[in-house]
Image (cartoon, rainbow, N blue to C red):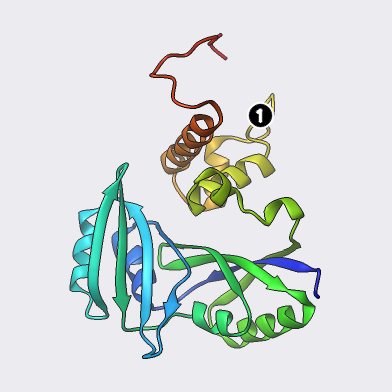
Amino acid sequence: MIEECLMVEFRIEGDDCPLADASSATGTSIEAAPPLLRDDRNVLLRFSAQASDKLIDYLDEDDRIRYLYQSVTDGRYNYRCLSLQQCVVHKLISAGFMVESLTYRNGNAILTGAVVGHEILQTVMETAGETVGVKLQRVYALRATEDASIAQQWDLTPAQTESLRYAVEMGYFLVPRQTTASEVAAELGISKSAFLERLHRAQHSLFTQLFGDTDGGHPGDDGQ
């Protein structure tokens, strides 16, 4: 049994898949589940984004998209559809890459996942090197506490998890703070308002699950 598991993060630039094109054309950040490749080589997609008529219209008009379904939850649109075009991600998956989060922003993608053992890592890295637009961001060992991801434990979206992780790593929650919201947002490649919205949604989700609903009251609130 192989006991070592590595986490790998890639940045994919120039992938002309439907979701990458949609994020570029509409300026919308799209959080996607791992794409599922069917036997007929078409792809099942599941993803979410902030409510946007522009995104819906763009996807409706994209000839590569079939059977688009959408629902709305807490101001976010959740989508399911069939794509007639594969994306770069499938090459990495075929090499042994296990996708855990996938975010499309401004036509590019941030892809995070797991690789079991150095042999598979080498195959994944060779595939990435042969694939135009794929750039390695970082590789690190999977800690035991990460095996059940934060997003699964606390019902956070990949973007919320990413925002919290960057904020912690950059010292945003330290007293005094070691960085500003604008600086964290710049590292994430989003606006300050988008970062703060993600942060507040993530905090609300975490605190609600930790302490439960309090009917809007704030017992013991000392203003800090």
Q: Nearer the viewer, residue 11 or 79?
A: 79
Q: Residue at x 35, y 65 (%)?
A: 24
Would residue 175 be seen by someone viewing this image from the given angle?
yes
How many other residues sit within 10 Å of disc 1, few (<14), some (14-19) or many (≥20)?
few
Could you tell whether 108 is left or right of 112 in the image? Answer: left
Furthest-front residue in view? 1
Placement of 67 over or under 163, stated as above or below: below
Q: Nearer the viewer, residue 1 or 174?
A: 1
In percent of the image, x 50 and y 46: which residue is there? Answer: 156
Residue pointed to by mark 1 = 177
In front: 62, or 95?
95
Quadrant housing residue 93: bottom right
Q: Is residue 66 above or below residue 169?
A: below
Q: Quadrant of the C terminus?
A: top right
Residue 133's spot in the image, x, y percent?
53, 78
Which percent across, then down, holds residue 199? 50, 38
The x and y percentages for residue 74 are 32, 41
Q: Is residue 101 above or below residue 216?
A: below
Residue 62: name its quadrant: bottom left
In-image side of 208 versus 129 (left or right): left
Q: Quadrant of the N terminus?
A: bottom right
Left or right position of 57 against 152: left
Q: Is residue 129 above or below residue 213?
A: below
Element under disc 1: loop
Which amino acid type is marked by label 1?
A: Arg
The answer to whether residue 55 of the structure is visible from this angle is no
Could you tell me residue 170's position as x and y percent? 67, 42
